[in-house]
């Protein structure tokens, strides 16, 4: 009996070692990946990865909204947040925040991700609406005509959409996009990152100046060449065509 007991204990230990050896978690695989000395661009979830998640999310989000409006409203409408390029900043920031705050939940059940995405997405969309109104005196969407809305800035249905998007993002899109970004050569990736960063900063500055001048140019004449450039190239007609859902807050 004593011999059989020791044999069972030894078999249990061997089985436990076998399970631990083969049940690798993502974190263990990442550590082994680094220990082998293989370097990739935007490894992990740092600055480079999050930046390109933002950029690609902005581009894909703009494309998705453009196609959605075409299918539902029958017209091609720009959904870009900026005057140059097709970048939806709301989508880009949404992907950034979903990744930054929820990437540790990637192995959790869908219901928990759905709840977290619903709350995070709703809060984010509300704050974006408040920011654009206070900063530029205009809003880019208004849900006042929809049920269960909060100040016209968010509504429950679209908050649920954020929850669904969070599941799709973490379970399907983010792993694919992460691998896609990591395939970029390291040197090229770093150069492209800072070139794109400078471009987006300039684009944001010009876009902000255009929206500001749109609100004040009738009463305040341009004071320098920069404001003259904005008034000449980004007229009210041009901006209203670029941002068709734009509403100026009186």
Image (cartoon, helix red, strand yellow):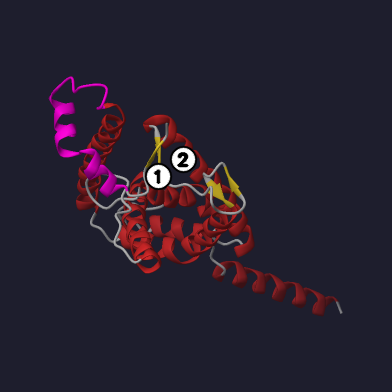
Residue that badge 2 annotates = 129
Whether 153 is drawn above or below 172: the answer is above
Percent coordinates x, y for residue 71 in the rendering: 37, 69
- Depth order, front residue of 11/105: 105
**Res. 140 mark:** 1
Residue under the image location 37 percent in, 48 percent down? 245
Q: Are marks 1 and 2 in contact (CB under 8 Å)?
A: yes
Mark 1 and mark 2: Cα distance apart in space: 7 Å
**One can see residue 57 in this view:** yes
User: Is residue 165 rendered to the left or right of residue 67?
Assistant: right
Quadrant of the image for the N terminus?
A: bottom right
Residue 84 in the image, given as x and y percentages of width and height: 22, 46
- In what element is the residue under mark 1? loop
Nearest the eye: 238 or 60: 238
Residue 232 on the magenta segment: yes
Q: Is residue 221 magenta?
A: yes
Give the numbered dot on residue 124: none
Counting labels gives: 2
Residue 109 in view in this figure = no
Q: In the visual, does 138 lie left or right of 7?
A: left
Picture coordinates of residue 133, whole percent (x, y) = 43, 34
- Please give left or right for residue 239 compared with residue 67 in the image: left
Q: Residue at x 61, y 71 (%)?
A: 19
Residue drawn at x 81%, y 80% as measured from the top left: 4
State which region is magenta: 217-243
Q: Quadrant of residue 204?
A: top left
Classify 10 Å Cα crowding around label 2: few (below 14), some (14-19), many (20 and above): many
Q: Earlier in the sequence, mark 1 or mark 2?
A: 2
Closer to the camera, 220 or 79?
Answer: 220
Identify the element where label 2 is drawn. Answer: helix
Indicate whether 66 appears above or below 87.
below
């Amino acid at each position: 009996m004593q011999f059989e007991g020791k044999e069972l204990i030894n078999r249990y230990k061997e089985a436990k070692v076998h399970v631990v050896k083969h049940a690798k978690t993502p974190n263990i695989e990442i550590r082994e990946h680094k220990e082998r000395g293989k370097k990739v661009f935007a490894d992990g979830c740092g600055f480079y990865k999050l930046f390109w998640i933002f950029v690609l999310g902005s581009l894909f989000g703009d494309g998705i909204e453009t196609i959605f409006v075409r299918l539902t409203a029958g017209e091609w409408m720009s959904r870009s947040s900026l005057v140059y390029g097709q970048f939806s900043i709301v989508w880009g920031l949404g992907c950034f925040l979903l990744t930054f705050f929820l990437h540790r939940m990637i192995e959790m059940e869908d219901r928990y991700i759905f709840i977290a995405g619903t709350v995070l997405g709703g809060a984010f969309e509300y704050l974006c609406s408040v920011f654009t109104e206070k900063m530029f005196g205009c809003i880019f969407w208004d849900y006042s005509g929809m049920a269960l809305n909060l100040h016209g800035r968010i509504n429950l249905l679209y908050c649920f959409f954020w929850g669904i998007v969070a599941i799709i993002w973490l379970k399907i899109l983010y792993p694919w996009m992460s691998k896609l970004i990591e395939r970029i050569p390291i040197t090229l990736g770093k150069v492209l990152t800072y070139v794109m960063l400078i471009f987006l900063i300039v684009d944001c500055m010009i876009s902000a100046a255009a929206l500001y001048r749109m609100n004040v140019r009738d009463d305040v004449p341009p004071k320098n060449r920069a404001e003259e450039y904005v008034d000449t190239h980004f007229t009210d007609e041009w901006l209203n065509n670029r941002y068709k859902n734009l509403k100026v807050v009186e």
